[in-house]
């Protein structure tokens, strides 16, 4: 055991010395396109990007009213001219194609794409209709796919760029009550993993963000249908401020991080489920990976326990007369 520990420390130290992560992305004087930037994390991110001295921020959302509020809610007048708004339903491939084309023609080179749109409708798998699964996948995954498919050729043409995929903690682990949502966010994570390698020759870098429960209008809607055990598993309904998640995105991208998580629990999940992706923390990834697996098994049993407890409450045993 001692020999194993020593060898692990030596290996971790060696990897840490030779490992080089991707270059950090500098937002200053860049054109950033934020998909789903009219509310929640996306809206907070727009305002933080303004303060990073971006040249232009093109904000895309389905709601024109919400898009106008992005400009109206910005407190500093000198920043408002940097925000450009575009109404688009990203579940429609033809609309995405024309919108990205317009953004490019009007604002020039797209340096960074942020795929932040998405929604969740929790519930029990056996009770939810298949159309909910289709609508979730259409927005969360195919919306991300459509925008990325249009932007990547432009980035290749212009010499590279940075693409940010907003997945979720639910894109790393399966959470009971989220059978509609987890697969869509797993798919986003999988797409990023493929493209990170495939597009490396074109100088396009990626970051994948895994927000925990975040205090957004969408989260408020989720809570209307969220099963009891899902609430318990996710921390009793506590949600972090959207601005904090947005700050972690800015910091992570500037640091050159591929994986970006706000909270420690999600960071451990990222270490536990890395796939063929860069290290999160090169030294600690190697040392604590076995511990993460052990913690994961413990968490699995805790989740199962919450599920069984809730099921028994919904299905009480009838006493015989």
Image (cartoon, rainbow, N blue to C red):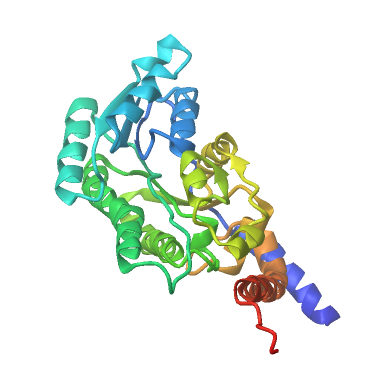
Asked if 98 appears above or below 153 in the picture, the reply is above
Q: Quadrant of residue 193?
A: bottom left
Q: Which quarter of the rendering shows the N terminus?
A: bottom right
* Nearer to the camera, 24 or 106: 106
| Image quadrant in which the C terminus is located | bottom right
Q: Nearer the viewer, residue 278 or 117?
A: 117
Single out the residue that lies furthest toward the right: 2
Q: Identify the residue shown where x is 68% and y is 73%.
A: 309
Tell which of 283 and 144 is nearer to you.
144
Q: Is residue 156 left or right of residue 172?
A: left
User: Relative to 268, does residue 71 appear above or below in the rendering?
Assistant: above
Q: Is residue 169 left or right of residue 289?
A: left
Where does the image place residue 143, in percent across and percent down from the top left?
29, 51
Determine the residue positioned at 44% across, 19% down. Answer: 73
Name the spot of residue 60 as percent of width and height, x first: 30, 35
Is residue 16 in sight in this rendering? Answer: no
- Identify the residue at horizontal 61%, vertical 61% (top origin): 228
Query: In the orientation shown, which residue stands out farthest toward the front?
Result: 321
Residue that lies at the very extreme toward the bottom in this rendered image: 320
In the image: residue 16, left or right of residue 155: right
């Amino acid at each position: 055991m001692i020999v194993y520990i020593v060898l692990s420390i030596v290996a971790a130290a060696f990897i840490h010395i030779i490992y080089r992560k991707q270059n950090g992305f500098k937002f200053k004087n860049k054109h950033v396109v934020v998909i789903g930037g009219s509310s929640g994390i996306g809206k907070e991110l727009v305002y933080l990007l303004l303060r990073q001295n971006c040249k232009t921020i093109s904000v895309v959302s389905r709601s024109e009213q919400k898009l106008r509020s992005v400009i109206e809610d910005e407190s500093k007048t000198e920043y408002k001219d940097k925000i450009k708004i575009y109404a688009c339903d990203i579940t429609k491939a033809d609309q995405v194609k024309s919108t990205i084309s317009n953004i490019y023609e009007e604002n020039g080179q797209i340096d960074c794409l942020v795929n932040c749109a998405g929604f969740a409708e929790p519930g029990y798998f056996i009770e939810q209709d298949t159309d909910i699964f289709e609508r979730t996948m259409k927005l969360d995954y195919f919306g991300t796919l459509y925008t990325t498919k249009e932007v990547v050729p432009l980035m290749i043409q212009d010499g590279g760029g940075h693409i940010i995929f907003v997945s979720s903690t639910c894109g790393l682990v399966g959470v009971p009550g989220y059978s509609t949502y987890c697969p869509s966010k797993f798919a986003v994570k999988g797409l990023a993993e493929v493209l990170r390698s495939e597009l490396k020759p074109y100088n396009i870098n990626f970051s994948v963000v895994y927000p925990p429960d975040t205090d957004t209008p969408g989260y408020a809607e989720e809570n209307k249908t969220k099963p009891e055990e899902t609430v318990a598993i996710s921390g009793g309904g506590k949600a972090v401020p959207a601005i904090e998640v947005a700050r972690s995105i800015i910091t992570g991208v500037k640091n050159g991080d591929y994986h970006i998580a706000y909270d420690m629990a999600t960071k451990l999940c990222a270490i536990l489920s890395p796939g063929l992706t860069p290290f999160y923390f090169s030294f600690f990834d190697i040392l604590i990976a076995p511990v993460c697996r052990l913690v994961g098994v413990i968490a699995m049993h805790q989740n199962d326990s919450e599920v069984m407890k809730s099921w028994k409450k919904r299905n009480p045993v009838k006493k015989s007369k």
